[in-house]
Image (cartoon, rainbow, N blue to C red):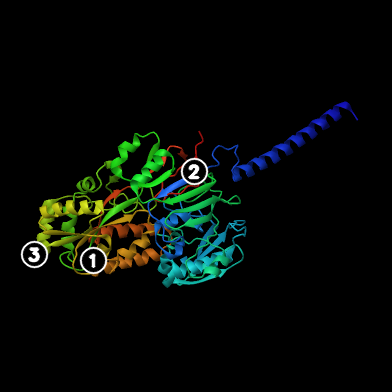
Amino acid sequence: MNKKIKTILNLVLTLIIAATFVACSSEKDDKQEKQGSVKNSKFGGTIVVAQKMTPPHLDSDKSTDWAISSIMNHVYEGLFEFDANFEPQPYLAESYEIKDGGKIYDVKLRKGVLFHNGKEMTTEDVVASFNRWMKNNDAGNMIAPYFDKVEVAGPYEVKFIFKNAYAPFISIIGSHVSNQKLVIRPKELIEKYGDNIMSEHIGTGPYKFVKWIPDQEVRLERFDDYVPSDKPASGLAGKRVAYADKIIIKSVSEQATRIAGVQTGEFQFAEEAPQDQYKMLEEDPSVEPVIVKPDGMEMLIINCGTPPFDNIYARRALAASIDMEELGRTMIGDENFWNVDGCIYPKGTVWYEENSGAGVYNNHDPKKAKDLLKKAGYDGTPIVIVSGQDDKVEKYGAIALKEQLEKAGFNVKIELFDRPTVVERRSKKEGWNLHFSYFYMACPDPQVEGAWTGTNAWISNWDDDDSHAMDKIFERMMMETDKEKRFEIVKEFYSKTWETLPYIKTVEYSRMHIANSSLKGYANSCQPFFWNTWIEKK
């Protein structure tokens, strides 16, 4: 063999061996990263979280308690998850199509997704989970009157069929509010427990359930065979990486204990520290305050079924009486934690409308209020504000509101009760006029607002020509699946709300969580989660 040719062949052989070695090494490194290789400094350790509330159980279909989903979001996943703009994105679903004018949702699943027991997820698990969700979950109950049937088109394709067009379906089954989300469980687990509360938990998430000690803690461990989405991380959507070996979520009711635990490093994260300690905690090098944005809003609920607020002019006088900035300073204090905006959806999200409430919201005008009150024929009967005596925001808000309304000519009486009594009192049509209530701004879809905006919805007792007109807006919103056209209807809803005032949004405000300075990668969210989050090694 020619020496030159032999040299070339040897070089080619060397390159092939090197390429093979690099490929194998790369594959090995990828697998090690997935399983938590010590070579990657992000992997390893235990994230300990101090949660404010203790969950009653861990079955999200059987309760609206947020303490459940903040834990079990690590274990269970949905067909759809919400991104940072409050828009549902396919997650366990690969894709979907809306067919037959909005009556059929044809959903294709990601292949190769594994449950924690090693079984692959297929449509039989989706159908079993959906049927249980429809029967047991409040969100399932919400869509049940409009739903027809579910059809399986193969192991990775399922069709959800409605009687008529139903636009909010994807948003509702992906909802991260009050455990509304449809999470996928193995068919066998559902058959074992039926409609009873589950004590075993097998999901597809980055962490698997290990143990729950009631009133103490929940233990989770990394699922080494987790199959993540390949989309960029955004909110609850996109790629999830389990960096920590374990997550321990402890029930710690005492604020002082949660704060001290983060300061000492006993906890890496704690829910809800008091806002008035912000500056002190900000100056502490061991702690990083986390102001939750977007978070919630304080809503002034109006009893529209009894005088004087069964009269539109009295409700308009109420709106003109309110100085939102003064309310914010009195209820919350530190301006880092509140702001004013007339839209009930946060700025930057798909449902935000910057002109919502223009000319009505935060348009403090005592003279106009007095004129409107006179037009309403108000006779001086006391306005009863029912409020919680243990809730600082509600209590201080009621006091500030009383002063503002009295300047406009209202006669106002505050009645303070414990929480159960407040709930009982406001459930009745008589005996109250106004009530402050905290609403999360992370609502999945404007259609959900119909549950407390239309005729006789929730506790407003609203039933007149305006409420019936609002009902029709929601009917059209429910059937319009084109996003741009639907948003135009949503803007009609906003406009009608500020015209007729079945309730009044006051201020947006934020809770404050705290993290130990060693916790990295935490994504600020209305509900904490700890994938894509790691402990910095020192």
Where 61 sits versus 230, above or below?
A: below
Where 468 sits versus 407, above or below?
A: below
> Mark 1 highlights which residue?
425
Question: Which structural element holds mark 2?
Answer: loop
Q: Amino acid at mark 3?
A: Asp
Q: Is residue 512 visible?
A: no
Label 1 crowd (10 A; few <14 / some 14-19 / many >=20):
some
Question: Which structural element holds mark 1?
Answer: helix
> Mark 3 highlights which residue?
379
Camera-side mark, 3 or 2: 2
Residues marked 3 and 1 touching at CB (< 8 Å): no
Q: Position of residue 273 (x, y in %)?
A: 34, 45
Q: Position of residue 345 (x, y in %)?
A: 34, 53
Mark on residue 533?
2
Q: Position of residue 413 (x, y in %)?
A: 14, 59
In-image side of 465 versus 232 (left or right)? left
* Disc nearer the start of the sequence (2/1): 1
* Disc nearer the start of the sequence (3/2): 3
